[in-house]
Amino acid sequence: MGQNGIDDVVRPRLTVLGTVTVDGREVTRSQAALLSALALRQGPASVPAGAAGSGPDDGHEAAPPGAPVGADVLIDAVWPSGAPGSARSSLQNQVSRLRRSFGPEVVLSTRAGYRLGLGTDAALFEAQADKGCALPPTRAAVELLEAAGRLWGGHPYEALADDTTAVAESARLCALHQRVEQCLARARIAIGDHRRAAVELAAMIESDPYAEVSWELLIRALVADGRRAEALQACSRLESVLEEDLGARPSGRIESLRRQLVSVPEDSCAGAVAHRNRHRCRDRHRNQRTPGEGS
């Protein structure tokens, strides 16, 4: 378990951030749509007990908040192109099959409809993301944000591709994932892991070349790693991308950063990096000394 109380063994039983699974097992297309609709319509679901961001550890998963989801809503999710005449009985059969396969708590019945009885990866991801991004950029933040990143499946609510609410929620979660990656990069830079931050930021820019926050962090990571020439090249690449694709200019923050790089001699950057690395080596040596050594 990590310093933030992160236990990699604790996992949500239901995943909706990519391929829909329960207890690590894939379900049918209809069951995936049914479970995804329950997770989506009930709002932020619970997280596994004992996981970072969860409530008291009582060994059980609390029921997700929100009102039960009516059968008509679920029927529309399972049969988006038009429900058959036997849709209600078919829906009940799907629920029964899920309960036989994964336990009666998977989908709970009420007079008003159905409720999801499992925690989801989406809820745990959001809890860890919010907490990790709120922390100062430290090793604790890196640990928590890395745990959030491991939950990411790439395509939230993909079983509900025709649902406008699901599409909007997917876009929101994708934006949150980008923020997690940027917060993680910022924390890596702060603790001195510049090269890894630069590699990860370069991959982020490949997938979203217009994200100026990612570009700014990349430039700062390169500078911190003593790669001033590459940092200036990154400034020029961003300028070209924005001008050619969007007819826009970089933000004032990027322009200011570039002016700073141009005005500082390269040997000054190299000297600053060498000075910082020398102090890190000294501190690491001090921390490794045994009690009583040198006394």
Image (cartoon, grey):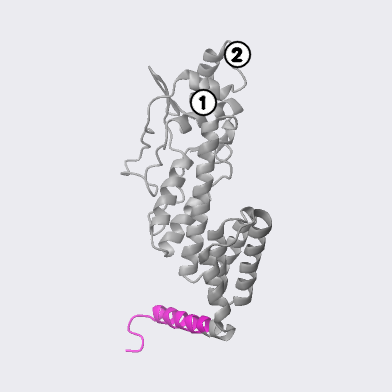
Q: Earlier in the sequence, mark 1 or mark 2?
A: 2
Query: Viewer-proximal residue, 29 or 134?
Result: 134
Query: Identity of the amino acid at label 2?
Result: Pro
What is the distance, in whole Å, between disc 1 and disc 2 at their CAs?
Answer: 20 Å
**Crowd class of label 1 (few under 14; some 14 to 19; many from 20; radius 10 Å):** many
Secondary structure at numbered mark 2: loop
Q: Is residue 247 left or right of residue 63?
A: right
> Which residue is label 1 attached to?
98
Q: Looking at this rendering, what residue extends furthest in the top direction?
A: 85
Give the quadrant of the N terminus: bottom left
Magenta region: 272-295
Mark 1 vs mark 2, foreground winner is 2
Query: Identity of the amino acid at label 1?
Result: Leu
Q: Looking at this rendering, what residue extends furthest in the bottom direction?
A: 295
Query: Viewer-proximal residue, 231 or 235?
Result: 235
> Which residue is label 2 attached to?
84
Residue at x-position 44% and y-position 20% = 70
**x and y, in percent, of residue 166 in the image:** 53, 34
